[in-house]
Amino acid sequence: MKKGAYIKRKHLRNFFLFFMTLIAVNISASYIHTRIDLTSEKRFTLSAPAKKLLENLDGTVRIKVFLKGKFPSGFRHLSESVKELLEEFRRYAGHRITYEFVNPLAGLPDSTQMKVRDSLTAMGIMPYNVKAQQNMSEGVSVQLIFPGALVDYDGHEMPVNLLQPQPGLDPLQTLNHSEALLEYDFMHAIGQLSMREPPSVAYMLGNGEPLTPKVYDALNVIQQNYQLDTINLVTRPYISSQYNAIVFLAPEMPFTEDEKLKIDQYVMQGGKILWCFSPVQASMDSLQKQSSFLAFDKGLDIDDLLFNYGVRINADLVQDLQCFSIPITVGNMGNRPQIERLPWPFDPLLMPQQDNPVTKNMDVVLSQFPSSIDTTAARGIRKTVLLATSQYSRTIGTPFKVTLESEKVQPDPRLFTKQHIPIAVLLQGTFPSVFKNRLNDQMLAQVQINFHHPYKSQSSDTRMIVVSDGNMFMNAVSPQDGPLEMGMDPYTRQLFANREFFENCLTYLTDTTGIIQARNKDFKLRLLDKAKIGQQKTTWQVLAFLIPIAFVLLFAVIFQFVRQRKFAE
């Protein structure tokens, strides 16, 4: 065989092997999804609880994502991020995770589109109007999109909103914030749907807690995600440890020693509590009937219990220059009142702390007449501030006369000298009983009979959240629309993160899988320094364009030189 023919056959064989290898790699890549996460914050790595949940799924999770179509670049990027995340889910769940991307409005007539939009909105998937321009010859058009998904497991569905907008964030930051929460949002939905039996949460009654339309949204949140029960603390002989958590929302009447003993022993059994009450009698409803009212201590007589657990709620009122504005009549214009929205320091906008999964990546929370919280020395209990005021705050002792007239005068900033006053605190650890060494043998025997377990003086590891605002988790009631979402202003319909905070509190208290830790993900924005770009523009242009071309030319010269030497020989 001639040497030229042999070389030709060798090259053909090598080309054929390379081509077949390339086809095999591409086919394998369509079935095998893998990637290496080189980011410092492990942006593309699932949390350990998420992996465990996906690996232990008993059935098939079907996910329908409503992000298909010609979108602006930001939403295309969000769609790709969702697809990559769902592919990562399939690495651990295999065929038990299926997904599809759909356009819910594609090809539908206007009348049907309206019904689909109303249906998705009713399920909790919120629509957004975005401006889009497909090409230079067309003008800018307004497009309605649904950045959400529907998770189905065993015939039960739960919506997931993929876009989490926050006031004050630019579009890039909003996108980054939404991407950071994608894993938690999907895994929370999958975890809720895959539970054989949802956790049980009891809403406490008996001490003047409201059971009116003002707590409709709070009870609705509990009912949608948990087994809801109501307990009358006065008539119920004890609080069963079968309840994963109990909620005290805005009690008005003092707690007796017998009631505190029931609460204390529930905690000693490992029970978890969401406390949300104000020690001061103050409400915006009073100002709707008159121009002023006297704020005073309710006398709930719960201080000894909370103090023993590591916190004290003071009988004062907190004011903050970072506050909400309310409509106030400032004068008359003819026969009509002149109404302006003026800052109301009694309604602080609370800043979520970013070092805890309960409040990580969360918007501000609206409060009304909150009180300050002090943490006290308590061995074995870790305390974490979840919500606090701004650096321009102050406290006012009670009794205090609250009047609308005083707010027509600009607040003096020199009076607001306190910083970051705690309004919500998380307590974790082993709690001591407040009744330790206070019960005689007869009382101890009675505890055994009433509670069906012996008295305990120390709890197992548990947790509770204390919030010093009884209005935070209540909702306004509109004469036209009925109960609104908690945190929504009935006049401007501006929405704050009160409901998200309430949901996160309950999730953190009842979560046994650790999924909520996925909220701790923090995606870093690695943006270019615009100042350096302007100063070093020429340098980077040379590096980006001339140097690569120079390397290509150098390689070509060397290759040609070697080739000539080879064939010359």
Image: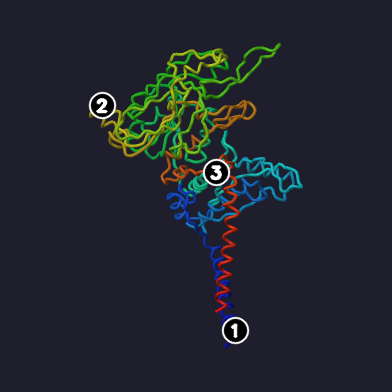
The dot on residue 380 is none
Give how far apart the Cα atoms at labels 3 and 2 are: 61 Å
Above/below status of 509 relative to 234: below
What's the residue type where badge 2 is placed? Answer: Arg
Name the front one of labels 3 and 2.
3
Is the residue under label 3 in contact with that under label 1 (CB below 8 Å)? no
Q: Is residue 351 visible?
A: yes
Q: What element carries label 3?
A: loop
Above/below status of 431 relative to 107: above
Name the front one of labels 1 and 2.
1
Rendered location of residue 351, percent (x, y): 49, 31
Give how far apart the Cα atoms at labels 1 and 2 are: 103 Å
Q: Mark 2 points at which residue?
A: 438
Rendered location of residue 52, percent (x, y): 43, 52
Above/below status of 58 relative to 312: below
Is the residue under label 2 in contact with that under label 1 (CB below 8 Å)? no
What's the residue type where badge 1 is placed? Answer: Ala
Q: Residue drawn 26% across and 26% down?
A: 438
Q: Name the residue under label 3.
A: 527
In the visual, does 276 lie left or right of 333? Answer: left
Q: What element carries label 2?
A: loop
In the visual, does 107 lie left or right of 266? Answer: right
Toward which corner of the image does residue 490 lie, by quadrant? top right
Toward which corner of the image does residue 344 lie, by quadrant? top right
Q: Which of marks 1 and 3 is nearer the N terminus?
A: 1
Rendered location of residue 134, percent (x, y): 71, 48
The dot on residue 5 is 1
Crowd class of label 2 (few under 14; some 14 to 19; many from 20; radius 10 Å)? few
